[in-house]
């Protein structure tokens, strides 16, 4: 009967060397990683972004335009691709923010400087032009 009892019941514990345990854990990790990896053939896809689903986009026209650019630039790589994709900024109309009431502001000097900058930049029609103008008008912030 003693021959059939497992070793741990007899008080003789089996000791595995650390290298055997490490090899077993490594094999288990690689086995789960290999099953978790998708089995999609990515050889047909080139570098760069892939077209987006415009149904969920905020600006559907911009999304569709971007998808057209992606399709047009799909065969280019490196600097050619960057030049192809980085088109001029959008010329969408932009309404600049309205000045705040500086009477209620914590720092009236900053509020007044911001109001003057808004007044100087009110003729800018795109968001990028407006931000550049505001950055040039406002004094640099103290650290």
Image: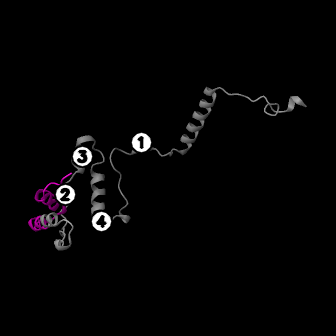
In magenta, the rendered stretch is 115-143
Query: Would you say 99 lies left or right of 20 here?
Result: left
Q: Earlier in the sequence, mark 1 or mark 4?
A: 1
Q: Quadrant of residue 7?
A: top right
Binning the other alpha carbons within 10 Å of mark 1 as few (below 14), some (14 to 19) or many (20 upward) gives few
Q: Earlier in the sequence, mark 2 or mark 4?
A: 4
Q: Which residue is the site of mark 2? A: 89
Q: Quadrant of residue 47?
A: top left
Q: Earlier in the sequence, mark 2 or mark 3?
A: 3
User: Mark 4 and mark 2 in contact (Cβ < 8 Å)?
Assistant: no
Q: CA distance from mark 3 to mark 1?
A: 21 Å
User: Mark 4 and mark 1 in contact (Cβ < 8 Å)?
Assistant: no
Query: Would you say 132 lies left or right of 80 here?
Result: left
Q: CA distance from mark 3 to mark 4?
A: 22 Å
Task: For marks 1 and 4, give the one nearer the viewer.
Answer: 4
Q: Residue 94 at what x, y percent from top left?
A: 19, 67
């Amino acid at each position: 009967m003693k021959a059939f009892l497992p070793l741990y019941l007899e008080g003789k514990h089996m000791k595995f060397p650390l290298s055997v345990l490490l090899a077993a854990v490594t094999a288990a990790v690689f086995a789960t990683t290999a099953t978790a990896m998708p089995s999609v053939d990515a050889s047909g896809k080139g570098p760069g972004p892939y077209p987006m689903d415009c149904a969920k986009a905020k600006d559907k026209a911009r999304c569709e335009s971007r998808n057209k650019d992606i399709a047009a630039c799909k065969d280019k790589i490196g600097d050619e691709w960057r030049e192809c994709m980085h088109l001029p900024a959008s010329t969408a109309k932009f309404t600049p923010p309205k000045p705040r009431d500086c009477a209620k502001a914590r720092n009236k000097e900053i509020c007044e400087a911001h109001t003057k900058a808004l007044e100087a930049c009110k003729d800018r029609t795109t968001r990028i032009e407006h931000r550049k103008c505001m950055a040039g008008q406002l004094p640099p912030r103290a650290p």
